[in-house]
Image (cartoon, rainbow, N blue to C red):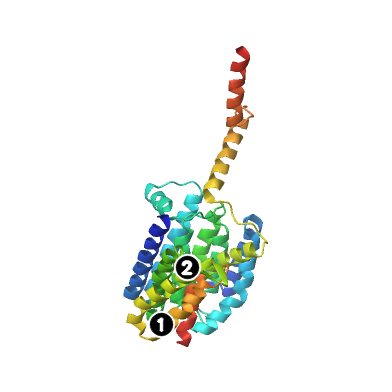
Amino acid sequence: MKELYRKLFHITFGAVIAGGIWVLGRDDGLAALFVALIAGLVLIQWKLSGFEEKVIDFFLSKMERKVTIPGIGALMFLLGAILALSLSKTVGFAVVVLLVFAFGDGASTLVGIKGSHRIFYNPRKTWEGSLAFFFTASAVSVFFLGPIALLLCFILAIVESLPIPFDDNFTITLAGAALSYVL
Amino acid sequence: MSLVAGASSADLYLVLACLGFAALLFCHNRRAIFLALLLATPTIPLLKNAINEDRPCEGWLTCPEDSGMPSGHSAIAFIFAAGSLGSPSFWFFFPAALVVGFSRTYWGAHSMAQVASGAGLGVALFFISEELLIYFGAIKRRTHWKVKRFVKKRILAMRKAKKSGNVMPAKQSSRQAKAPVVKRR
């Protein structure tokens, strides 16, 4: 249940950030994300110092995995958005990468935890999860990019399934930004 | 004001070097900070060449010739800020990183977007280095934040008990309190 709330928040958060960037543009979008990063770092520091606030505690108890730093998931998403926006060739491509990541990663986790067919190079992931990533992300991004979105989502689904020790927020957004120069 | 106007990029590097020295002295994540700095050294120039975005260069007498995206100064300053997260030294490194970032926009060496990008890159590089060190077994994963806070509270309670003369921690003293009752019976 916690994972469902978490991924629903992940999708909503991603869609809101992508929409905000689409409206604000690159420079103002990056400035807004910078303000959010500052606020996020201060909130995490307050939480680590013993600060208690009912609303934040409610969200953490409902959505946070067993992690070493409170709110690290949201912070990683913000960092991924900053990297995608600053490294992508165009704002439109950065928005698509964020939407692919938000919807694809959310769907892959929700479907993947029910799946039983393990991927041979990464036993922590399942084929069902990767397929869910591909189909959901394609359905969202095909409206923006056309048929090339299928190739983008296929490559990003492979990247998502790789056994890389870094957070998905970095790997997918960085790979997406790199693909903006190739596709 | 004249001091600010006369400051050059080299002076800022001196400030960053001092910040780095302080970080290596006071931060508990020294290894991750050091690795993040090592990773940042080739990454930032590579990204500057790849993105190739001009600097605003307004009111800056000696504007650097390289591209502006992302800001290297703010990336390095935010590596220290992220490295000190969870320790009291954060309240020194974080404002310092903000001052470094905003001074770059104030002097016209970078736009706000370039500073934001540098800050994001710096924090991301720190967490990537931390994950790399954990993966290769160089450092242990941090304790869960709730457990850490619980342990901190226990230690503070024990210190308070020591100061007030009651040397035993709260749990043991309650056992002692039960013991005399048994003796009386």
Q: Could you say where residue A89 lies in the image, as x and y percent from the top left?
A: 44, 83
Q: Establish if B167 lies above or below A65.
A: above
> Which-is-in-front pick, marks 1 and 2?
1
Q: Could you say where residue A15 lies in the image, as x and y percent from the top left?
A: 35, 69
Mark 2: secondary structure: helix
Q: Establish if A46 lies above or below A103.
A: above
The residue where tag 1 is placed is A150
Whichever of callouts 1 and 2 sits on the residue coming sooner in the sequence is: 2
Q: Amino acid at mark 2?
A: Leu
Is B158 or A132 nearer to us in this picture? A132
Is B12 or A86 nearer to us in this picture? A86
Q: Chain of mark 1?
A: A
Is B142 or B3 nearer to us in this picture? B142
Q: Chain of mark 2?
A: A
> Picture quarter containing residue A152?
bottom left
State the separation of the CA atoms marked 1 and 2.
25 Å
Is A94 or B95 nearer to us in this picture? A94
The residue where tag 2 is placed is A79
Q: Decide: few, some or many residues near mark 1? Use Cα within 10 Å; few <14, some 14-19, many ≥20.
A: some
Mark yes or no: residue B51 visible: yes
> Picture quarter containing residue A32?
bottom left
Count the labels in the image: 2
Q: Decide: few, some or many residues near mark 2? Use Cα within 10 Å; few <14, some 14-19, many ≥20.
A: many
Residues flagged by tags 1 and 2 on a common chain: yes
Q: Could you say where residue A84 lies in the image, as x and y percent from the top left?
A: 45, 75
Q: Is residue A58 left or right of residue B76?
A: left
Q: Establish if A72 lies above or below A15.
A: above
Q: Could you say where residue A177 lies in the image, as x and y percent from the top left?
A: 47, 79
